[in-house]
Image (cartoon, grey):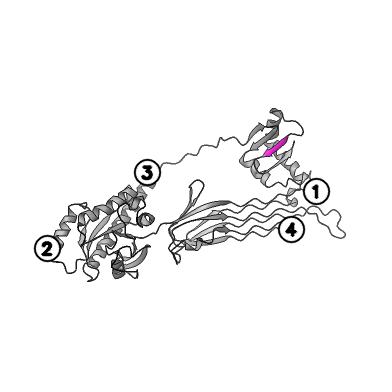
Amino acid sequence: MHFIDKVSVTVCAGDGGSGRVSFRREKFINRGGPDGGDGGDGGDVVFVASNGENTLAAFRYQKELKAQPGQDGMESKKHGRRGQDLRVNVPVGTIISRQSDGQVIADLTADGQEAIIAKGGQGGFGNAHFISSTRQAPRVAEKGEAGETFMADLELKMIADVGLIGLPNAGKSTLLSVISNARPEIADYPFTTITPNLGVVDVPDSGSLLFADIPGLIEGAAEGKGLGDDFLRHVERTSVLVHLVDAYNDDVAAAYRTIETELAAYSSELAQRPEIVALTKVEGLDADIVQDLLSQLRAVVPKSAPIVAVSSQAHQGTQELVFQVAQMVQAEKARRAAEASESEEAGLPVLTLKDTTKAFTVEKKDGAFYITGRKIENFAAKTDFDNEFGVQRLRDIMRKMGIMHELTRQGIEPGNRIVISDKGEFDY
């Protein structure tokens, strides 16, 4: 299966079912009265984070995610069946955002976490709902509300404790295969790894850590060169970075600076992430050569970052590296928890001002009157404009809201067209 970490899909929640206009008709029962049932609500589109998924490849060909619509109301006051929700499994670490404005709808960071991405439309009321002391035989029912429909962007950002970074062929995949249960592809040429790999590393007395092997970065990766620009996002959520530097580089200090420059170009916060530097492939090198290489790195690596020498092939220094990383991860998680706690304690109550937005607007244009407003548009969307009783009910609602008064003030005359957004229109 191909590794895909960004896709766009159309999300369609189910439409609500329409209410029913009907009257009870039984032998020996005269004027049984209205008995039209309400329509059922449309199904929601629900995304569920699952550790069983590790790519968004399933959405390459499934471009529309559609929930079931609600059933229309029936006679004898029978309520229409609610539409079935569409439950969509995505990898842990998936961010769902609305394509039109970039608004993040959900960020699923834990196995089993759920989020309603698109809400199903409400079912319309049947005529049995509108009976009153003054209206004994209503012939009006509501249409079902449309479910939410929009284009959504799905982006996967892997959630790992540790990110392995470095130039191509620095030994990231080999190290991951030695310390974890992962079996990434390994070869003696650059760019062997073209997708991120995950591996679980068991640490005695510390539980386990999740390591992510990020494909090799090159100079200019943050600007789109090589593979790195596509996968830098996968180190954003890591607690600690392990920066691998090949001991056989012509200039180990320059190799280190290349990657650090790309991290800073991609994200200033990422460049400040706790880090440990590992000089790799030291098997067969004299001790004094290894020491000289470590000194070259020490000259450019921040003092807060430990530097170690390891050989994955010879299993030299790898366990020590794992223990050091585990300690750094624990310290970083404790620091973040403390910051979160301080933020909650220092948080001030948020005052929400009363919404002063006008409930509706009326604009006269080309002899017609155009009305907009969330509340009146919702009523209009549920109105059957082919049913005179339904249109009359909408007029009554407009009168109660003050819209008819505003239309009169602006000089509306019989025969003028009234247009309510894109929901419907009728003559005054």
**Vertical arrangement, residue 366 with respect to residue 209, above or below:** above
Viewer-closest of 276 and 289: 289
- Amino acid type assigned to the residue bearing label 1 in the image: Ala
Crowding at label 2, few (<14), some or many (≥20) Cα neighbours within 10 Å?
few
| The image quarter in which residue 329 lies | bottom left
Q: Where does label 3 land, which residue?
A: 346
Crowding at label 1, few (<14), some or many (≥20) Cα neighbours within 10 Å?
some
Q: Where does label 2 land, which residue?
A: 288
Q: Where does label 1 land, which residue?
A: 137
Whole-percent x, y for residue 136 in the image: 80, 47
What stretch of residues is rendered in magenta? 411-419
Circle nearer the N terminus (2, 4):
4
Residue 402 visible in rendering: no
Q: Distance between the residues labelled 2 and 4?
A: 87 Å
Q: Residue 74 carries which label?
A: 4
Q: What element carries label 3?
A: helix
Q: Are marks 3 and 1 in contact (CB under 8 Å)?
A: no
Instruction: Give the number of the mark in front: 3 or 4.
Output: 4
Looking at the image, residue 217 sits to the left or right of residue 388; the answer is left
Whole-percent x, y for residue 379 in the image: 67, 44
